[in-house]
Image: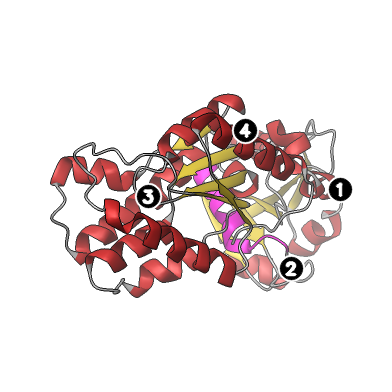
Amino acid sequence: MPSGVIIGRFLPFHSGHAQLIRHAAERSPNLCILVMSRETDPIPGWTRYAWVKNTFPELDVRHLPEYNAPDAARIRSCAPNDADTLFEGGEKHGNLAASLGWRHVYIERKQDISSADLLHNPMNHFDLLPEEARPYFIRRIALLGPESSGKSHLAKELAAHFNTKYVEEYGRTYCERFGMDLEPLDFAHIAGGQLYREDEMARQANRVLFCDTDLLVTQVWSEIYFKGHCQPWIMWANHLRRYDLFLLLKPDIPWKNDGLRAYEQQRSRMFERLLNELTARRLPHIVVSGDFEARTRQAIEAVEAVVSSSSRQYRL
């Protein structure tokens, strides 16, 4: 059976696109989706390609970078050789289909908002975003701090208050299983596990996700373990990852030994190291202090301001 083709920017990928793809796949099982992108797009092309491919893993999805205008020759060279149909949720590619010598099939889709409006304010239309696209748009809040500063407790409190999810600290899970005698490779596993957990929970989050630690904390722990040394890729990854707010917890509550803590005397040093890094890099942060009730109150107020704001810096 000949192949059908859908072309689009998917900027952003939304439920209307998903509906179009499902209906086209019913008519053309050998469906190919071409994701067009330009370097100036507000969302990278490879990100949109990943959204579509991971939503429809069984389909042939291809990324066309540096695509500036409808180009029949480019489409023909990138599409399957047996393609003969262009599916669309509108009429704008009719001339392109004619230039290719393909049938042009219009499939009506139910979508009450334009892609531009959805991109401008995704939080107001969060339900229109497929699961794979949501992690890009949610607000991410990272909780940082030394040992026994209440990060896990506060993450749970905030997730409950905002009716969403939180990411547990993978380093704790790892050490519970393998112990505290760590080598540099262990920190690589911990860093990778933390990112994996965060991205998995982001698919389930409701507009905001709370992360109990991040790779900046992993870097500082590595520096403590290995006399100031940390693997460069962990530094690279923690510079690349974006958060809308950092909550830095001050170590002004009693230290408790739970069997995995051994650096009570390092708490002040680690707090200052984290504060200096956040300040030097101009990362959005507040210092949270006081008893547990005070910490929760301060954090909720700061997070509410972030969630209600329409301006933010998208992640790569």
Is 127 contained in the magenta span?
Answer: no
Residue 139 in the image, given as x and y percentages of width and height: 63, 45
- Badge 4 density bin: few <14, some 14–19, many ≥20, Cα 10 Å: few
Labels 4 & 1 near each other (Cβ < 8 A): no
Q: Mark 2: which secondary structure?
A: helix
Q: Is residue 100 left or right of residue 143?
A: right
Q: What secondary structure do most residues of the magenta stretch adopt? A: helix
Q: Quadrant of residue 68?
A: bottom right
Q: Mark 3: which secondary structure?
A: helix
Upstream in the sequence, badge 4 or badge 1? 1
- In the picture of the structure, the residue carrying the numbered disc 3 is 194
- In the picture of the structure, the residue carrying the numbered disc 1 is 91
Upstream in the sequence, badge 2 or badge 4? 2
Q: Quadrant of residue 314?
A: bottom right
Is 56 contained in the magenta span?
Answer: yes
Q: Which residues are magenta?
A: 42-57
Residue at screen point 22% across, 70% down = 226
Amino acid residing under circle 4: Arg
Amino acid residing under circle 2: Ala
- In the picture of the structure, the residue carrying the numbered disc 2 is 72
Upstream in the sequence, badge 2 or badge 1? 2
- In the picture of the structure, the residue carrying the numbered disc 4 is 297
